[in-house]
Every structure is written in C-alpha cells, then in structure tokens.
Image: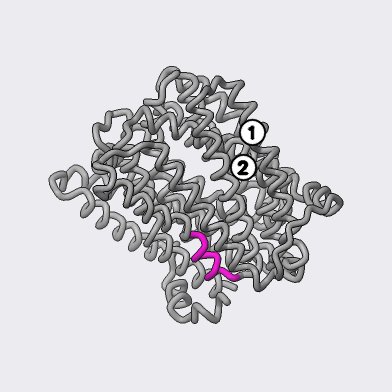
C-alpha cells in the first residue's frame, strides 16, 4: 500500500506540476492584471459566494462515495447513475438557495448574471468530482490523475487564445473567463463519465426516491462537515467585499490567496489519495500508522519550507507576478501562506478522521472554526482590511489543525510521539534562520535563484532530520507505476 501511495503521488504531482501552476499563476493572474483589481475583486467575491452553498450540490455524496466504493467496489455499477440522477435535482436546490441568498446580501443585475453562470460551472465541477471519487475508490489513481488536470488544461488552451492572440486586439472581459470555464468544465465532466462507462454500463438517468433518501441520510454528516469547512475557508473574500463595499481589498486578498491555492493543490493531492487508502486499510483492520507517518513527514516538511520562504519574500513575490502591488498585498500574502502549514497537516489528520467515520467530532470542530473565523473577520477586516482577513484565516486554520491532531490520537487510540513534531519545529527554525540570512547577505541576487537554493537547503535539512527518508525515494523508483496503480 505504501508503494501504491508513493507511486500514485509521484504521478499526480508530475501531472499537476505540468498544468495547474501555469493556470493559476499564468492564466488566472493575467486575467486579474488585464481587468483590474476592482473588476476581478467583484468576480472573486461572486466566485466565493457560489462556493458557500456548494454543499447543496453535493450533500457529502462525493466523500461518502469515495469511502464506500473503496470498501465496497462492487457497488459502483449499481449506484453510479442513481447518484448522478440525484445530482440534477440537487442543482435546482442549490440554485434556488444561492439566488435567494444573493438577493439578501444585495446583489443586482450584472452580478446575478455572472453568479448564474458560476452556479452552472459549480454543477459541472460537482459532476467531475463525483466521477473522480469513483476512480479513487477503485484505486484507479492514474485515470483519476488524468481527469484531475483535464479542465485546467482545456482552460489554458481557451484562455491563451483569449489573452494573447490578436483576435481580440488585446481586449479582455471577465465574462469571457467565466464562459471559458463553462466550456472546459462541461467537456471534462462528459469525458469523465465516458471514461467510467465500461465500469458502470449503459447510461440511464433515473431517480430512485427510496435510494436517494437513504443515501442522503448516510452522506449528511459529510455534507455538514464540507459546508462548515467551506464557509470558514471561503467567507473571507465575501466579507471583505461586503463590509468594505468595494472590490479592491477582495482583489488584494485574491492575489495572495491565488498563490496559496497554487501550493495548496499539491497538499490536496495527498488527501485525494489518502482517503480511499485509509478507508480500505481501516475496513480490513490493517495498520494505518506507516501511511499516516509518511504523509505527515512529507507534507509537514514541504509545507514548512515553502511557507517560510514565501513569508520572508512575500512582498517580492507579489511584485514579481502582479502589476501595481501595494504593501498590503505582501502583508496579506505573508499571513495567508503561513496557513499552508496547518492546512497541509489537516489533509492528513482530517482525512484519517473522515475515513474512520468520525464525523460528529469533526463537525463540532468545524462549527468552532466557522464561528471563530467570522468573529475574527468582523473584528479585523474594518481595521486591517485584507491583512485582517489573512490573519483570521491563519488563526482559524492553526487552531482547527491542533484540534484534529488531538482527535486522531484520542479516537483512534494512537500513542502520541512528540519526536516528529520536534523535528518539524527544528526544521522551521533552521530554515527561517537561513532565509533571513540569505535575504540580508545576498540581497542583490535574483529572487527565484535565492528561493530555489533555499528550497534545496530545506530539503537537505529534511533528509538530515529524516523527515523525508531515502527509503521513501527508493520505494518510488523501485515501484512499477502502471502495476501498482492499475
């Protein structure tokens, strides 16, 4: 199982490195440069608003399905089209409540037009995620990896034409970006379903009332957890735009959040692999300690190295990518990128709790996180604007991460070993000292060269501290990817 995890992770990382960073930092960031902070900030607030009730599209079905198919793969052909049919009904529910909520917060004409398209996009994304949950549940990680980059790959093609061809004489509208998303997501959803056809048989949409009610009852705890975590992860941008009555601060916040998204997607790959692997190991009564330790060590080390380098060079990194950045941009990004550390560890501990079915304590934790995040935003946004929202995110993610670590050791009766945490703190101290030294002594060197060398230094430290082990690398090299995955 360790070999399968490592080889699958390698494939996922390589594919995502080829596509997603360019989309986030090349396409998405260029769109913001073209349309300006205010226009993009308004779009970004609407995008996050469309996420807030996204759970009504899913109601926990995706995570429940991943765990269920991993433990009972024979149920795929029996359940797939029943669940897909249910999703169409859920879209109507999601659209109704999102529109009503939009009226309540004061959205009007053009905002509702963009919001309606973004809602349709969310539906296509939900279909893609559901399809991928079946590939993951079956441990078909290679196919899942290819589907995971398909929508972004198509968006790169479409948006490259819109942004850099001479067809539109340099003009670009935010609506075009949203339309391109619609085409890419719809195409990817269709291809994902076609790829599953040999596993699920003839396409037959048919809602079964009894089945749907039973499924929603089982998936409700997952739905509640996703909803609460989505709220405290995405509500910052909406609160910024609504409390300050302009899109500029939301746009500044989006600059830093975009880079956080770019690095976070690699940590998210771990969760996508860990959930079906943890679920199958727990079902069989086998030990999860080796996989948990491996994911904790790798994610903890990489997130600390990345976050601390980006924190120290936050203003320089913002200026490298964006036009006309302010001091607020660097400060906001600095606090945001530090939250990458607790978020990464959450992908290990939160995923293990989800695979174990420990949804009740997770939901209590998420309620705490949401209340804390909203209160902190109300206090900090008016005074510190985008920086205040970033601080609220960091504090919320750190405290909820600590709670999840405690829950894992308590509920799964795993003896707490302080040594890996001591090693991570040591890695953080040595890395931070090196970053500040390089910044002071080699200030004139190129930014990317300094960051690259510091990252290599951090990796060497991680090997010395045995957070990343040579045996892990040998296992990746020694495994046959096609055999271990498919």
Residue 233 falls inside the magenta stretch: no
Label 1 neighbour load within 10 Å: few <14, some 14-19, many 20+:
some
The residue positioned 41% from the left and 49% from the top of the image is: 262
- Taking the image as shown, residue 127 lies to the left or right of residue 170, namely right
> What is the residue that sits farthest to the front in this orientation?
167
Quadrant hosting residue 65: bottom right
The residue positioned 44% from the left and 33% from the top of the image is: 43
Q: Is most of the magenta stretch helix, strand or loop?
A: helix
Which residue is more in the foreground, 428 or 75?
75
Residue 170, percent from left and from top:
25, 41
The secondary element bearing badge 1 is classed as: helix
Residue 422 seen in the current view: no
Residue 319, percent from left and from top:
24, 38
The secondary element bearing badge 2 is classed as: helix
- Taking the image as shown, residue 90 lies to the left or right of residue 455, namely right
- Residue wearing tag 2: 403
Which residue is more in the foreground, 314 or 65?
65
The residue positioned 72% from the left and 66% from the top of the image is: 76
Q: Which mark is residue 368?
A: 1
Which residue is more in the foreground, 11 or 402?
11
Contact flag, marks 2 and 1 (Cβ < 8 Å): yes
Tell me the magenta residue range. Answer: 140-148
Residue 243, percent from left and from top:
48, 19
Label 2 neighbour load within 10 Å: few <14, some 14-19, many 20+:
some
Residue 143 falls inside the magenta stretch: yes
Q: Quadrant of the N terminus?
A: bottom right
State the colouring used for the structure image. one colour
- Taking the image as shown, residue 82 lies to the left or right of residue 14, namely right
The residue positioned 72% from the left and 60% from the top of the image is: 81
Residue 286 seen in the current view: yes
- Taking the image as shown, residue 96 lies to the left or right of residue 259, namely right
Mark toward the start of the polypeptide (2 vs 1): 1
């Amino acid at each position: 199982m360790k070999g399968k995890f490592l080889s699958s992770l390698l494939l996922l990382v390589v594919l995502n490195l080829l596509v997603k960073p360019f989309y986030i930092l090349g396409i998405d960031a260029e769109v913001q440069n073209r349309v300006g902070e205010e226009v993009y900030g308004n779009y970004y607030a609407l995008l996050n608003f469309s996420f807030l009730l996204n759970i009504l599209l899913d109601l926990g079905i995706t995570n429940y399905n991943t765990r269920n198919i991993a433990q009972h793969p024979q149920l795929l052909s029996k359940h797939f089209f029943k669940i897909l049919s249910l999703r169409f009904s859920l879209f109507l529910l999601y659209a109704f409540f999102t529109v009503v909520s939009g009226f309540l917060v004061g959205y009007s004409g053009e905002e509702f037009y963009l919001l309606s398209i973004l809602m349709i996009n969310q539906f296509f994304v939900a279909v893609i995620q559901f399809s991928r949950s079946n590939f993951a549940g079956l441990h078909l990680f290679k196919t899942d990896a290819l589907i995971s980059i398909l929508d972004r790959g198509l968006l790169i093609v479409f948006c490259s034409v819109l942004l850099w061809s001479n067809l539109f004489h340099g003009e670009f509208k935010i609506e075009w970006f949203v339309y391109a998303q619609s085409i890419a997501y719809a195409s990817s959803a269709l291809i994902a379903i076609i790829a599953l056809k040999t596993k699920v048989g003839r396409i037959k949409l048919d809602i079964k009332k009894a089945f749907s009610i039973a499924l929603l009852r089982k998936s409700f705890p997952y739905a509640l957890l996703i909803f609460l975590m989505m709220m405290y992860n995405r509500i910052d941008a909406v609160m910024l735009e609504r409390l300050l009555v302009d899109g500029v601060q939301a746009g500044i916040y989006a600059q830093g959040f975009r880079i956080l998204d770019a690095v976070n997607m690699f940590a998210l790959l771990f969760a996508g692999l860990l959930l079906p692997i943890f679920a199958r190991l727990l079902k069989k009564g086998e030990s999860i300690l080796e996989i948990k330790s491996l994911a904790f060590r790798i994610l903890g080390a990489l997130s600390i190295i990345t976050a601390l380098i980006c924190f120290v060079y936050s203003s320089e990194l913002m200026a490298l990518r964006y036009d006309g950045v302010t001091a607020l941009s660097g400060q906001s990004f600095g606090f945001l990128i530090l939250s990458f550390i607790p978020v990464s560890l959450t992908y290990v501990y939160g995923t293990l709790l989800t695979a174990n079915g420990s949804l009740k304590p997770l939901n209590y934790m998420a309620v705490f996180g949401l209340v804390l995040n909203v209160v902190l935003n109300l206090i900090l946004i008016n005074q510190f604007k985008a920086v205040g929202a970033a601080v609220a995110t960091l504090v919320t993610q750190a405290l909820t991460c600590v709670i999840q670590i405690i829950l894992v050791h308590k509920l799964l009766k795993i003896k707490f070993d302080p040594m890996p945490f001591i090693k991570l703190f040591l890695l953080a101290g040595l890395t931070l000292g090196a970053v500040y030294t390089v910044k002071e002594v080699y200030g004139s060197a190129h930014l990317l060269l300094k960051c690259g060398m510091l990252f290599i230094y951090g990796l060497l430290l991680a090997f010395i501290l045995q957070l990343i082990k040579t045996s892990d690398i040998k296992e990746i090299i020694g495994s046959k990817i096609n055999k271990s995955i498919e």
